[in-house]
Amino acid sequence: MYHLNGWVNQVSKEDAREVGPVYRVLSQDLYKTGFHGEEIGYRQDEMWRSKSRQFSKDADIVGKIEESRRTSEKEKLPPLKKTGFFVLRQSMWSQIDEQDRRLVVKLFSNSGGWIASLEEMIAEEYASSFASDRPLVAFTVLTKENEFVTWVKQLRRGGLSTENFVFYILGPDNTFDTYRIEGSRGTLGDDFKTIRLKGNQTVAEIDSKFGDFGGEFSVKIKDPVLAENEWFCRILQCFSIMIAYRGDIHGKIDKGFHLWQGGKKFPSQDRNEVSLLANPRKLTLKTDELEEV
């Protein structure tokens, strides 16, 4: 059965939902080169694999995670401190044909414990893009906080709108909170803001700074309750990393449509992607409840 890891108590604090200054910063820094501390040393990959089975043999450490947080707006936001790193599964991205690529990124703590995973959903992308006549990104997020699969989908809102993505997370008593991630206008780089449906407030912002080879993607949480919610924060962390790869994903989908229509190449689903489509009711419903659906 599932658990919400404190989320029920957090969302009940409606008196604390006033959006204010930045309460938490999560920085995802994409390395410029392949030489960095986590991979330097003899048998370093084997060491990480011994700490977590999520660290696969094709995992390449491509960036670090830094964090800063405060519990009150009266406190001063402390300097960023390294809290982990993230990997890219190279066998599904750089080591295969461009049209067969599937983005899979995993986040780990400093000690090597798994935190979250981002997995691109190829079939959903093609279906949504076909309906919208425009390449659209779709991915799922898995986190250590619960057993749920969170879908993050790019949607088309209109010819003049910026990029838009949507996701939701569960609340108490079968409620849920819905969020829209939209591109910010008039900014340098690929910046986004996250808007909560209830109150229509910007509860988080994502600042992107691209370098020659890498990039830094900073998530700034402005809602004091959401700053404490790991589920919400992991989703935005994964989204921020995806920003660096979405141009390649758009290009892959656009080219894939022409190849598919011409009968030259047919996309397929990885078995791990298919597994994310499995019936979840066996995990969330009791045996007697299955008779009612």
Image (tube, rainbow, N blue to C red):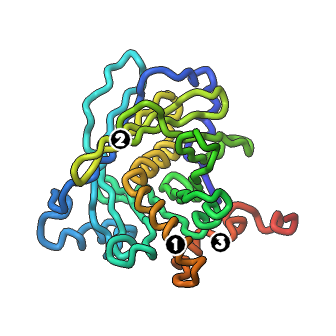
Q: Residue 153: give x, y in percent of width and height.
A: 58, 53
Task: Using the numbered discs, state the Cα–Cα distance from disc 2 to disc 1 in whole angstroms.
Answer: 28 Å
Q: Is residue 66 above or below residue 43?
A: above
Q: In this view, does 197 lie to the left or right of 136?
A: right
Tell me what residue is drawn at x 59 percent, y 67 percent: 126
Q: Which of marks 3 and 2 is nearer the N terminus?
A: 2
The residues tagged by marks 3 and 2 sit, at their Cα atoms, a distance apart of 35 Å
Q: Is residue 164 left or right of residue 42?
A: right
In the rendered image, residue 218, in percent from the top left (x then y), is placed at 36, 39
Mark 2: amino acid: Ser
The type of residue carrying mark 1 is Gly
Q: Where does label 3 land, which residue?
A: 278
Q: Provide the secondary structure element on which disc 2 rests.
A: strand
Looking at the rendered image, the quarter that the C terminus falls into is bottom right
Type of amino acid under label 3: Ala
Can you identify the residue that label 2 sits on? 208
Which is more toward the observer, 200 or 161? 161
Q: Where is residue 135 in the image (x, y as percent from the top left)?
A: 55, 59
Q: Which residue is drawn at 57% across and 78% down?
A: 260
Q: In the picture, which quadrant includes the N terminus?
A: bottom right
Residue occupying the far left of the picture:
41
What residue would you read off at disc 1? 256
Image x and y of residue 39, in percent: 18, 64
Q: What is the crowding at mark 1: few (fewer than 14 residues within 10 Å), some, or many (at least 20)?
A: many
